[in-house]
Image (cartoon, helix red, strand yellow):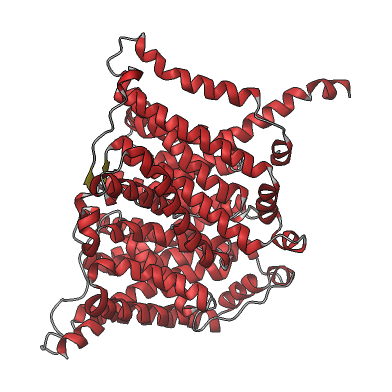
Amino acid sequence: MTANWANKRGVGAGALLAWAGLALLPLIGFITENTSFDYYMYMGQSMLIYAIAVLGLNLLIGFNGQISLGHSAFFALGAYTTAILMNFGGWPYWATLPVAAVVCFLAGLAFGFPALKLEGHYLALATFTLAIAMPQLLKYKAIAGWTGGVGGVLLDKPDPPEWTGLSADQFLYYLCLFCAMVLFWLVFNLLRGRSGRAIMAIRDHTMAASTMGIDIARYKTVAFGISAGITGIAGALSAITVAYVAPDSFTLQLSISFLVGLVVGGIASLPGCLIGGAFIVLVQNSAQSISDWMKGTFALRYDVPAWAIYGVLLLALMYVLPDGIAGGCARIRAWWTTRGRREAQ
Amino acid sequence: MDFFIQQIASGLTSGAIYACVALGLVMIYVSTDHINFAQGEMAMFATYLAWAMINAGVPYWIAFGLTIAVAFFGGLFIQRVILKPLEHAPVLALVVCFIALLSIFNAIAGMIWSYTIKQFPSPFPSHDLFGNGLVSVQQLGVVGVTLVMLGLLTVFFRFTTLGLAMRAAAQNPASARLMGVRVAWMLALGWGLAASIGAIAGMLVAPIVFLDPNMMNGILVYGFASALVGGIGNPMGAVAGGFIVGVLENLVGSYVIGNELKLSFALVVVVGVLLLKPAGLFGRVIVRRV
């Protein structure tokens, strides 16, 4: 499945349609009277941000085969880079994005070196520790002057340019969408080229890849760096759209939600990242109503928390649909396109 | 000097708890080759069960024993029902599975018992041992329980047929099966034992850090660090590693980096050991045949 996809030429019509659809969504704001429209736009921003983060994680886990549970740390690093530059440097929001990307790329590269020696469970373990240690590091007193300590940093939401006539949330949605499109396009191109084949070859069979002359160490560390950089941009965007960063929003739970998005959307699938991002936000937002529904239907005495739903879903997917929603769709499509042949037999 | 000795003593106490967590991790690693990320949450959940029983009026030691038994069957159940179908799945699927278990246990504990901090009784009195404020009976009790547990496990693996069968199943499943060892059940047994050890760790730690659904988060990381320092396949090493990490953590915390960065110390230990001496202090270097 992955191979077919990687050999495809150009961007498919489906992808173009999907992006165009996403770009048209904010325009509904001009014709709707719904007062919570701005909130829907905010949800849209979160979905795109999660999609970008999952894209970064997917590049590493899905395409390169390195397991990371520590991407919340890179997300945090990106968010804090932006927050500090905006708050202390007085930088405009857009100028902080590349800096966040570079900082996280370097951090990822630095973590990628020790990661070279680790495989499977051990890498998961080391990154798991990173995710747990990160909030504490951010609260550290010596850097509290910059990070705001436990309280975090409050930012100003950027104003949209006058000529666009958009509301703040519509504008930020377009900002996220623009970043997402650029990053998806870059990753798409990266994966289709020589480097992409090398990255996937390492996942499929490291030793075979190395006998083919692929520099394992270089590709693995760079993949780690790029992955961290992408997730860092997602973090930076989240700092801009939420206009607030605090250490306790970057816990292991955040890493787990990325993992949920990755598994639900589909491992090693680019459209899957968008699906996963949307899914994370939908479950978070509807956790209360799902809980109420379950309480009503099954006469439960307790609230059902979102994390229980995530957990059960992760387990269930591992059995039923190990390649996620995108993989499921691909299978249905394959079944549909080969139906004539099957009938003929 | 007194302060120094106090730090060592409290380091040994936390070390004993890390050793318990590490023992649980080693049990699962030895019998199935997996690193169980849900070990901490399983221990936390078992501790809540004990808390509920004690609150319902069950005497402490009976609740203690019952919890260990329940945890044992819980671990057995998880391995047989949830992990068995994923026997030949890739590592990622297993990691996802463990993370799922972690979320589920955490969420369910929060759902039933809420996230407010609860006090957990200790079986040991908290007064001083020698009356000079250095070592308390509580600390000695925690260390004692850990050492007894290590002793029992050693005896079990060395001198009982079941222990021998478990070691055989872990080291060479194919040959063990030919000799009539029920390998699959040995793995489940490993999980059951690990869950029981975790439950003991949870009940030892809860009086010190108080009971809440997130109490094992940091401790699990130290448990990992301990298991790695001692060599992840070696129970004796895990306990030694636990004590080493506990004492070091306390000394580094009070003399060098301050208490706020203690978790980062664990991160440094984990990454450092994995990089410099992946086999740990007492582990065997595994040479893989291709």
Closest to the observer: B55 or B119? B119
Across and down, in percent, residue A339 comes to 78, 22
Q: Residue at x 47, y 64 (%)?
A: A126
Q: Is residue A316 above or below residue A40?
A: below
Closest to the observer: A276 or B33? A276
Could one spot residue B232 in this view of the protein? no
Q: Residue at x 60, y 75 (%)?
A: B167
Across and down, in percent, residue B111 comes to 30, 43
A199 horizontally vs A276: left or right: right
Q: Residue at x 40, y 43 (%)?
A: A97
Residue reaching furthest left? B131
A227 horizontally vs B255: left or right: right
Across and down, in percent, residue A317 comes to 55, 40
Across and down, in percent, residue A119 comes to 58, 63
Q: Residue at x 53, y 65 (%)?
A: A113
Where, by quadrant of the figure, is residue B159 drawn? bottom right
A240 horizontally vs B127: left or right: right
Could one spot residue B67 in this view of the protein? yes
Closest to the observer: B104 or A116? A116
Where, by quadrant of the figure, is residue B14 drawn? bottom left
